[in-house]
Amino acid sequence: MPLMTWDKRYSVGVKSIDSQHTVLFGLINDLHDAMLKGEGKSMTGSLLKKLADYTQTHFVAEEKMMETANYPMLAEHQAKHRELIKKVDGYSARFERGEAALNLHLMNFLRDWLTTHFMEVDHEYGPFLNDHGIK
Ligand SMILES: [Fe+2]
Ligand SMILES: [Fe+2]
Protein backbone atom coordinates (compact mmCIF):
# COMPACT_ATOMS: atom_id res chain seq x y z
CA MET A 1 0.00 0.00 0.00
CA PRO A 2 1.47 3.36 -1.03
CA LEU A 3 2.35 5.85 1.69
CA MET A 4 0.98 8.74 -0.34
CA THR A 5 -1.87 8.87 -2.80
CA TRP A 6 -2.40 11.84 -5.08
CA ASP A 7 -5.60 13.70 -4.44
CA LYS A 8 -6.98 16.79 -6.14
CA ARG A 9 -6.76 18.76 -2.90
CA TYR A 10 -2.98 18.67 -3.44
CA SER A 11 -3.35 20.41 -6.79
CA VAL A 12 -1.85 23.89 -6.99
CA GLY A 13 -3.71 24.64 -10.24
CA VAL A 14 -0.61 24.56 -12.47
CA LYS A 15 -0.33 21.41 -14.58
CA SER A 16 3.43 21.03 -14.84
CA ILE A 17 3.85 21.61 -11.11
CA ASP A 18 1.17 19.06 -10.27
CA SER A 19 2.92 16.48 -12.39
CA GLN A 20 6.26 17.20 -10.67
CA HIS A 21 4.56 16.88 -7.30
CA THR A 22 3.14 13.54 -8.44
CA VAL A 23 6.67 12.36 -9.28
CA LEU A 24 7.75 13.31 -5.74
CA PHE A 25 4.88 11.27 -4.33
CA GLY A 26 6.04 8.33 -6.45
CA LEU A 27 9.63 8.62 -5.23
CA ILE A 28 8.52 8.68 -1.61
CA ASN A 29 6.34 5.63 -2.23
CA ASP A 30 9.29 3.81 -3.85
CA LEU A 31 11.39 4.56 -0.81
CA HIS A 32 8.61 3.41 1.49
CA ASP A 33 8.25 0.14 -0.48
CA ALA A 34 12.00 -0.45 -0.31
CA MET A 35 11.89 0.10 3.45
CA LEU A 36 8.98 -2.33 3.90
CA LYS A 37 10.75 -4.94 1.81
CA GLY A 38 13.87 -4.51 3.89
CA GLU A 39 16.01 -3.58 0.89
CA GLY A 40 19.68 -3.06 1.52
CA LYS A 41 21.48 0.20 2.05
CA SER A 42 22.67 0.60 -1.53
CA MET A 43 19.11 0.43 -2.84
CA THR A 44 17.55 2.69 -0.22
CA GLY A 45 20.52 5.08 -0.34
CA SER A 46 20.19 5.53 -4.07
CA LEU A 47 16.42 6.06 -3.78
CA LEU A 48 16.99 8.66 -1.09
CA LYS A 49 19.49 10.41 -3.33
CA LYS A 50 17.08 10.28 -6.25
CA LEU A 51 14.45 11.91 -4.08
CA ALA A 52 16.86 14.63 -2.90
CA ASP A 53 17.98 15.31 -6.50
CA TYR A 54 14.48 15.47 -7.90
CA THR A 55 13.38 17.74 -5.07
CA GLN A 56 16.18 20.11 -6.06
CA THR A 57 15.18 19.96 -9.76
CA HIS A 58 11.55 20.61 -8.88
CA PHE A 59 12.36 23.58 -6.65
CA VAL A 60 14.46 25.18 -9.39
CA ALA A 61 11.62 24.74 -11.92
CA GLU A 62 9.07 26.11 -9.48
CA GLU A 63 11.21 29.13 -8.61
CA LYS A 64 11.75 29.88 -12.30
CA MET A 65 8.00 29.98 -12.84
CA MET A 66 7.47 32.28 -9.88
CA GLU A 67 10.25 34.52 -11.16
CA THR A 68 8.74 34.69 -14.65
CA ALA A 69 5.44 35.83 -13.15
CA ASN A 70 7.15 38.28 -10.76
CA TYR A 71 5.61 36.52 -7.82
CA PRO A 72 5.98 38.87 -4.83
CA MET A 73 6.58 36.06 -2.29
CA LEU A 74 9.45 34.46 -4.23
CA ALA A 75 12.16 35.22 -1.65
CA GLU A 76 10.16 33.72 1.22
CA HIS A 77 9.30 30.69 -0.85
CA GLN A 78 12.94 30.17 -1.84
CA ALA A 79 13.96 30.33 1.80
CA LYS A 80 11.50 27.55 2.61
CA HIS A 81 12.86 25.44 -0.24
CA ARG A 82 16.41 25.92 1.01
CA GLU A 83 15.41 24.85 4.49
CA LEU A 84 13.83 21.65 3.14
CA ILE A 85 16.82 20.83 0.93
CA LYS A 86 19.10 21.26 3.91
CA LYS A 87 17.02 18.81 5.93
CA VAL A 88 16.79 16.17 3.21
CA ASP A 89 20.49 16.50 2.28
CA GLY A 90 21.43 16.30 5.94
CA TYR A 91 19.41 13.16 6.36
CA SER A 92 20.83 11.64 3.20
CA ALA A 93 24.39 12.34 4.41
CA ARG A 94 23.71 10.87 7.86
CA PHE A 95 22.21 7.84 6.18
CA GLU A 96 25.34 7.42 4.02
CA ARG A 97 27.56 7.61 7.09
CA GLY A 98 25.44 4.96 8.78
CA GLU A 99 24.25 7.36 11.48
CA ALA A 100 20.61 7.27 10.48
CA ALA A 101 18.30 4.49 9.47
CA LEU A 102 15.52 4.46 6.96
CA ASN A 103 12.49 4.03 9.15
CA LEU A 104 8.91 5.05 9.58
CA HIS A 105 10.01 8.20 11.36
CA LEU A 106 11.86 9.39 8.25
CA MET A 107 9.03 8.34 5.96
CA ASN A 108 6.52 10.29 8.03
CA PHE A 109 8.83 13.28 8.09
CA LEU A 110 9.15 13.22 4.29
CA ARG A 111 5.42 12.78 3.80
CA ASP A 112 4.59 15.59 6.19
CA TRP A 113 7.02 18.13 4.77
CA LEU A 114 5.82 17.44 1.26
CA THR A 115 2.14 17.65 1.98
CA THR A 116 2.51 20.69 4.24
CA HIS A 117 4.65 22.48 1.67
CA PHE A 118 2.26 21.70 -1.20
CA MET A 119 -0.87 22.56 0.71
CA GLU A 120 0.31 25.64 2.55
CA VAL A 121 3.15 27.22 0.60
CA ASP A 122 2.72 26.06 -3.00
CA HIS A 123 -1.02 26.63 -2.87
CA GLU A 124 -0.43 30.34 -2.36
CA TYR A 125 1.14 30.92 -5.76
CA GLY A 126 -1.47 28.97 -7.81
CA PRO A 127 -4.01 31.75 -8.40
CA PHE A 128 -1.23 34.30 -8.94
CA LEU A 129 0.46 32.20 -11.61
CA ASN A 130 -2.91 31.45 -13.21
CA ASP A 131 -3.60 35.19 -13.40
CA HIS A 132 -0.28 35.56 -15.20
CA GLY A 133 -1.20 32.98 -17.82
CA ILE A 134 0.57 30.01 -16.23
CA LYS A 135 -1.83 27.11 -15.88
FE1 LIG B 1 7.48 25.13 -3.31
FE1 LIG C 1 6.43 22.38 -5.07
Image (cartoon, rainbow, N blue to C red):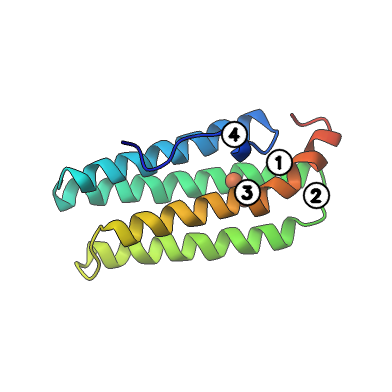
Earlier residue among tags 2 and 1: 1
Mark 2–mark 1 distance (CA, rounded to whole Å): 9 Å
| Kind of element beneath mark 4 | helix
Residue lying at 77% horizontally and 41% vertically, measured from the top left:
68
Residue occupying image coordinates x 61% and y 62%: 80
Q: Is 71 in front, or is 2?
A: 2
* Residue farthest along the bottom direction in this orientation: 99
Q: Amino acid at mark 1?
A: Met
**C-alpha distance separating marks 4 and 2:** 18 Å
Query: What kind of residue is marked 4?
Result: Asp
**Mark 4 sits near ligand 2, with its Cβ under 8 Å away:** no
Q: Earlier in the sequence, mark 3 or mark 1?
A: 1
Question: Pointers 4 and 1 in contact (CB under 8 A)?
Answer: no
Q: CA distance from mark 3 to mark 4?
A: 12 Å
Q: In this view, which residue lies farthest toward the right?
A: 131
Q: Amino acid at mark 3?
A: Met
Report which residue position mark 1 lands on.
65
Q: CA distance from mark 3 to mark 2?
A: 18 Å
**How packed is label 2: few (under 14 Cα within 10 Å), some, or many (20 or more)?**
some
**What residue is disc 2 on?**
71
Please indicate whether residue 127 sits to the left or right of residue 118 in the image: right
